[in-house]
Amino acid sequence: MRLPDPALVVLVGPSGAGKSTWAAGRYRTEEVVSSDALRGVVGSGPHDLDASADAFALLETVVAARLGRGLTTVVDTLGLDADRRLAWLAAARAAGLPAVAVRMHTPDALCRQRNAARDRPVPAPVLAAQLKRAALVGTALDLEGWDLVHVVDTDEAPRVPEEAPRRVEGHTPRRGPDDRRSSQGLRVVLQVSRFPWGEDPAGWLRSVALAADEAGFAGLALMDHLIQIPQVGRAWEPIPEPWVTLGMLAGLDTRLDLGTLVTPVTFRPAGVVAKAAATLDALTGGRCFVGIGAGWWAREHAAYAVPFPSARERLDLLEDAIRTMRALWASGTKAYAGGRVDLPETTGYPRPAGRIPVVVGGGGERRTLRIAAELGDACNVASDPETLDRKIEVLRAHCRDVGRDPAEVAVTVLDLPVVGRDRADAWARVERLRGRSPAAAFARRTHAGTVADQRDRYGALADRGVDTVFLGLGDLAGPEDVLALADLVG
Ligand code: CTP
Ligand code: MG
């Protein structure tokens, strides 16, 4: 059972029910606001009842401050006081956060037994009174308007059951002999956009690619920019030329598909891109793909003296480039007359080993997705669920218009999550990466969480009809970060 996150989580249950233990197993220490712990802060220890008023005043301050920042807040008190509960519920609503009550449903005898075993047990009559109130609290919670009342039974079965592989109706994934898919039916390709390779560029690249292969990634994609983009790093950080780099990776003993995500059509004449891709495909026995887009960054064009025409012209170029590449990759050497693209001959050797997939990057609804529908093997759009549904709808409509079977145009997404070993690590990464963005907004935007969290999300992407996820890590440091994703990819 995965609870909403971020959220207000209010624990409810008598002493010894296991509230603090439950919270400690799921949340970071800083996320749990505990009246006992605060008694220890302002009083002599967690059971200093004389310090209760001060502890609760502090607790309210902390809860309000965290909710105000949109941060997950777990309130660890008995939770048996309806007025307090309703005040926290209202505060969560005001902050726009979902409000969850977690009721610990623990047999009375077990609570008594655990209480008796403590250094400072709650007096028996006090516990008896708590047990009486706890027995009635279920009904109250149901009426209070919580977004979710989660009941934890002491003998609750292990969480997260194994999931069966998903199949998406009306969707035929391309399956070659080496079509690696996750247990959720997705191809997951590592997108590498930063290269903190220190003194050993080739060694770093090699270790990252071998780790991707070992973790079970279906492929490796390189960004294509002339200057590192501000979204990823600083202008003086290295960003290698992708075809040269892919050539080096082609020499490693892996089963990874290799390609660009995406190469701007403005950088190289389409015929030269076709040549590079055909060469890579021949060298790798058919593992090349070409992610290609219209380009967007004026600065890198100016700096390298590469023309940067208008958006309309770049989209025309994109359309022509795909036609040109396909013509040059087709068998034979005959002339090609495509109307807008005319080639006197299509002599291209080495020939690609197979059909090279063309992934059209960008979510532009009027033209980019139309080009994907008409000429692409796949589109590539952002992974956030709201826009994704819309883009898929638009793509399908274009397919209908141009008479293309939508199953022939795979939906791929670029996904840039923050992934931590555990909740604490994920949060540490958010703190490191967020820059000036508020933490809660950054964590939401980057789907910050564990591998298990990302798996849930990828299951939902597969259900929406996504075929391939290009997964990029904003803080990729080396092979360990790649190996840590094995459970997401396999
Ligand atoms: N415990 C356990 N197994 C669980 C949950 C709890 O053995 N599944 C034990 C804990 O180790 C602890 C005792 O039961 O010694 C009480 O658990 P705790 O989480 O501290 O209970 P709370 O509900 O937080 O009790 P209180 O209200 O007194 O803080
Ligand atoms: Mg406790």
Image (cartoon, grey):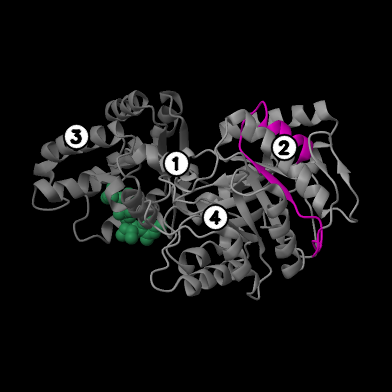
User: Residue 365, percent across and down?
Assistant: 65, 28
Q: Earlier in the sequence, mark 3 or mark 2?
A: 3
Percent across and percent down for residue 132 are 34, 38
What residue is disc 4 on? Answer: 157
Instruction: Indicate which label's residue lies in the foreground, 4 or 1.
Output: 1
Which residue type does callout 3 highlight? Thr
Q: Secondary structure beneath disc 2?
A: helix
| Residue 299: image tag | 1
Is residue 239 or residue 189 the one in the foreground? 239
Range of magenta residues: 348-375
Tag 2 and tag 4, C-beta contact below 8 Å: no
Q: Nearer the viewer, residue 344 or 367?
A: 344
Q: Which residue is mark 3?
A: 61
SS at mark 1 in the image? helix
Q: Is residue 263 above or below residue 490?
A: above
Q: Which residue type does callout 2 highlight?
A: Glu
Q: Amino acid at mark 4?
A: Ala
Is any part of residue 165 visible from this angle?
Answer: no
